[in-house]
């Protein structure tokens, strides 16, 4: 490990590697510090059957845009990890694996990075630890019986690895829906505690929904378009890339036999309580889809093209339980898929808002030389995903070069 470096990039996922690519083109001396291995978050925080939910053509890393035989397919986890490994190798990225950061502080002429017993000085630092950092568990989890196995989504691997019994999944975003489908198809009874989530049809008039979101400019919306800062925590739209890509939402799960419940409230002994708000949650998702369709329609009208049409399904109105008994219903496992929260406690600098997100503009912060990458809505809706991270990396790298 060097004693000092011009630029230190923290994180070797898509955000860090994309930034490294542009700095390499600019011949800027830098190192990429990774707590685990290249693409560690993809490797260790995804279940065995994971695949992309956005089409392969959205993999737009600088210098290595997807050019394979199946642009409209959805890469498996193994294929995606291989892609990142090959990308880092071809780039000859200066990655230092197994280099966990314990503290980032200012130094006399830059920054001091603590890596356990080691220290590294850097003139510039790019924090690229991604959008998925600390899994969120709602309050009341400590009241669950001790004999019920509790897992975060990132700890789930496959149905066979779960203890016997039914499974309760709390959280109904992309991940919650996909786990519910997989576990149900394995023959288990599955309960899904639902919240307010966006859903989208997989395809509209021959194009993947992501194509429409890109072409209409929906993915290029900036954070100023959000109704509130809290909206940054809204989960990714319900859909799946499995089976060639198809719809996967509350209605699909209900039809296949997953028991839908309202929002999880808490536990008292063996009894679990849920709000009577499933209808409101489904209506919320329906309304957000209508918003998206209106956005796409307006874009098509402005371009003189025909907008896609979609017949909205009728409101989902089913009778749900507000109480489930762990013993009576045979629940052996609870999986928490309640999203992620920022986790920058090791960054000892005053650059965060009340929710823990970095306060930045185009990646730059109020601390000269400190940048962020891969943050939800950093610059645009697409900032944290494979389709948009390269654009942000180019902007951040340009700022670094200009600051020289």
Image (tube, rainbow, N blue to C red):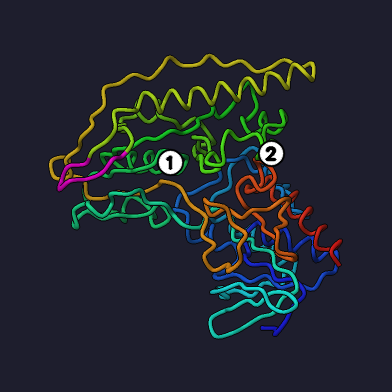
| Mark 2 Cα-neighbour bin, 10 Å: few <14, some 14–19, many ≥20 | some
Find disc 2 in the rendering and name its residue. Answer: 222
Pointer 1 residue: 178
Would you say the residues marked 1 and 2 are in contact, meaning their CB atoms lie under 8 Å apart?
no
Relative placement, left or right, of 79 versus 368 is left
Residue 313 image position (x, y, % from top left): 46, 16
The residue shown at (14%, 45%) is 327
Q: Which residues are magenta?
A: 264-272
Of residues 302 and 275, the one nearer the viewer is 275
The total of numbered circles placed on residues is 2
Q: Give residue 142's quadrant in the image.
A: bottom left
Query: Does the magenta segment cover residue 44?
Result: no
Residue 196 in view (yes/no): yes
Residue drawn at (46%, 26%), measured in percent from left and top? Answer: 284
Q: Nearer the viewer, residue 383 or 188?
A: 383
On screen, 109 above or below 177?
A: below
Q: Residue at x 63, y 47 (%)?
A: 385
Point 67% across, 36% down: residue: 219
């Amino acid at each position: 490990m060097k004693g000092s470096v011009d630029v230190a990039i923290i994180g070797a996922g898509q955000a860090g590697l994309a930034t490294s690519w542009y700095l390499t083109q600019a011949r800027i001396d830098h190192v990429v510090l990774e707590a685990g291995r290249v693409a560690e978050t993809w490797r260790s925080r995804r279940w065995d059957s994971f695949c992309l939910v956005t089409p392969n053509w959205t993999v737009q890393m600088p210098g290595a845009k997807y050019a394979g035989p199946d642009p409209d397919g959805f890469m498996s986890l193994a294929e995606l990890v291989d892609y990142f490994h090959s990308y880092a190798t071809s780039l000859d990225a200066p990655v230092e694996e197994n280099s966990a950061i314990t503290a980032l502080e200012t130094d006399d002429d830059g920054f001091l990075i603590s890596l356990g017993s080691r220290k590294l000085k850097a003139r510039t630092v790019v924090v690229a630890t991604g959008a998925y950092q600390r899994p969120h568990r709602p309050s009341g989890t400590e009241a669950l019986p001790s004999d019920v196995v509790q897992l975060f989504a990132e700890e789930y691997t496959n149905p066979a690895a779960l203890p016997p019994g039914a499974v309760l999944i709390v959280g109904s975003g992309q991940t919650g829906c996909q786990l519910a489908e997989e576990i149900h198809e394995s023959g288990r009874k599955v309960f899904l505690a639902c919240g307010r989530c966006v859903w989208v049809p997989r395809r509209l008039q021959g194009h993947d929904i992501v194509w429409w979101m890109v072409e209409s400019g929906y993915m290029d919306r900036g954070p100023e378009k959000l109704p509130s800062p809290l909206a940054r925590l809204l989960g990714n739209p319900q859909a799946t890339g499995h089976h060639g890509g198809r719809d996967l939402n509350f209605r699909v799960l209900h039809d296949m036999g997953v028991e839908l419940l309202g929002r999880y409230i808490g536990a008292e002994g063996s009894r679990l309580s849920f709000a009577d708000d499933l209808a409101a949650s489904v209506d919320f998702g329906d309304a957000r889809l209508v918003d998206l369709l209106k956005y796409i329609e307006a874009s098509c009208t402005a371009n003189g093209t025909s907008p896609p049409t979609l017949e909205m399904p009728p409101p989902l109105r089913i009778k749900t339980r507000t109480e489930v008994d762990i013993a009576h219903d045979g629940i052996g496992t609870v999986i928490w898929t309640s999203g992620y929260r920022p986790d920058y406690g090791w960054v000892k600098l005053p650059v965060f808002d009340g929710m823990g997100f970095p306060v930045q503009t185009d990646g730059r912060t109020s601390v000269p030389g400190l940048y962020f990458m891969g943050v939800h809505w950093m610059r645009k809706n697409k900032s944290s995903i494979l389709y948009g991270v390269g654009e942000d990396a180019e902007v951040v790298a340009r700022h670094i070069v200009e600051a020289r």
